[in-house]
Image (cartoon, coloured by chain):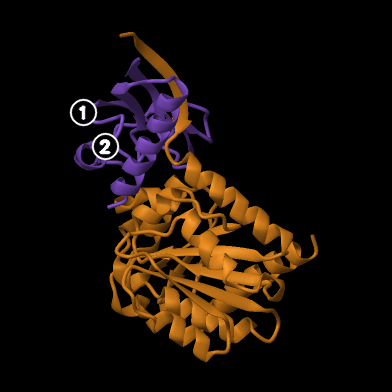
Chain colours: A orange, B purple
Amino acid sequence: MIQQKVQIVEKILDANDQIAMQNQQNLDNHQIFAINIMASPGAGKTSVILKTIQMLQDKMRIAVIEGDTAAVTIDADKVSALGVPAVQINTGGQCHLDASMLDRAISSLDLQQIDLLIIENVGNLICPASFKIGTHANVVIASVPEGDDKPYKYPNIYRGIDTLILNKTDLLPYIDFRKDYFKTGIELLNPGLEIFELSCKTEEGFSNWINWLKSKVSNQTNR
Amino acid sequence: MHELAVTESILSIAQKHAAKANASKVTDIYIVIGKLSSIVDDSVQFYWDIISQDTICEFSTLHFERISARFICLNCSTEYEVAAEMMPCPNCQSIHVKVLAGEEFYLDSIEIER
C-alpha cells in the first residue's frame, strides 16, 4: 500500500462558479441585463420588484425569477398579474439559489423576449452571499425597520454587492435608524457602494433606481 | 444552512481527484478557510460524516486551516491583521479599506492510499 499526498488547490464552490459564468455568457448572448436581489425576509424585495415592473414595463421587456424555499407561488402570481413572465424556483428548503437552479429557470424562459431579468433570491442575509448565480449585478435591499446595525451583523452579504437599496425610508420619522451609522458600516465593507434610498409606498427616491436600471439595460442592449 | 451544499462540493472535488490518482481510499482532507468566509467547521464535519458514507472518502478526517484576515487601508496604505470583522485602519482610523486576505475557501490537498 502506498500513501500519497495529492495537491489540489481547488475552490470549493468552483463548480458553482463555472455554471454561474456560463449563465452570464448565456444572458450576454441574448443581451439581457440580469440582477440578483438579496435581502432578509420582509425587506420589500417583491414590493420593489412589482413597483419596478410598473415603472419600466412600457419601456423594456422584463421577466422575473422567484426563488422561494416553500412550494408557494404567492410572489410569482403577483408578478404574473402584471403581465410579466414569471418563473418560480422552489429550493425545497434550501436557503439560497445556486447557479444550476438559475440555469434551469433560465431555460424555461424565452430569452429572445427579455431585456431585464430580475431574480429574487431566497429571503436570507447569509447564504446567498456565498453563491454566485451569474447575474450582472448583485443588489441587496435593506430596509429601515430592520435596524441600522445590519451591515455590522451580516457583513458578508454587503461585501460583494454592486448596489444597495435602502427601502421603506417613509418610516424614518418613526424609527430610531441612524443613517450615518448604517452608511459607515456599508463604507467599511464596500467603499463607494452606490446606495438608493427609496420608498415603495411613497415612491420617493424611486426614480434614481429606475434610471440606474435603464442605463444598465441600455448598455447591455447596445453592446 | 448552506454547509450541506458546501460539503457536497468538498466530496465531489475529493472524489474526482482520488479517482485521478487511482486511490483506493482517501484518509485526510485539508481545507483552507479564510476568517471572513461564513463557514462553520463543525457543521461541515457533521454533514461530512453522513454524506461520505459508502464513498471512497468514508472515515477520512477533515482538517481545517483558518487563514487570518488582512486589510489594506486605501487612505494611508497601512496593511493590518483584522481582529474584529469590521476594524478601521489602526493607523489613520479610515474606514476605506480593502480585503487582502481572509475570503479564501478551497480544498488544498488530500491524502490517499493506493
- Disc number placed over residue A35 in the picture, else none: none
- Specify the subunit that label 2 lies on: B
Q: Nearer the viewer, residue A56 or A119?
A: A119
User: Quick check: A131 left or right of A214?
Assistant: left
Identified at 48% across, 77% down, the residue is A48
Q: Position of residue B19 (x, y in %)?
A: 43, 26
Residue A174 vertical placement versus A2 (above, below)? below
Q: Quadrant of residue A72?
A: bottom left
Evaluate whether residue A199 shows in this view: no
User: Quick check: A165 left or right of B60?
Assistant: right
Evaluate whether residue A129 shows in this view: yes
Q: Nearer the viewer, residue A76 or B86?
A: A76
Cβ atoms under marks 1 and 2 closer than 8 Å: yes
Residue B76 vertical placement versus B111 (above, below)? below
N-terminal of the two: label 1 or label 2? 2
Q: Position of residue B71 (x, y in %)?
A: 44, 32
Q: Which residue is mark 2?
A: B52
Question: Which three-letter amino acid code belongs to the residue tagged 1?
Answer: Phe
- Determine the CA span between mark 1 and mark 2: 8 Å
> What secondary structure is found at the residue carrying circle 1?
loop
Callouts 1 and 2 on one subunit: yes
Question: Which three-letter amino acid code belongs to the residue tagged 2?
Answer: Ser
Identified at 55% across, 55% down, the residue is A162
> What secondary structure is found at the residue carrying circle 2?
loop
Q: Nearer the viewer, residue A177 or A78?
A: A78
Q: Quadrant of residue B14?
A: top left
Q: How many marks?
A: 2
In the image, farthest residue toward the right: A222
- Disc number placed over residue B59 in the picture, else none: 1
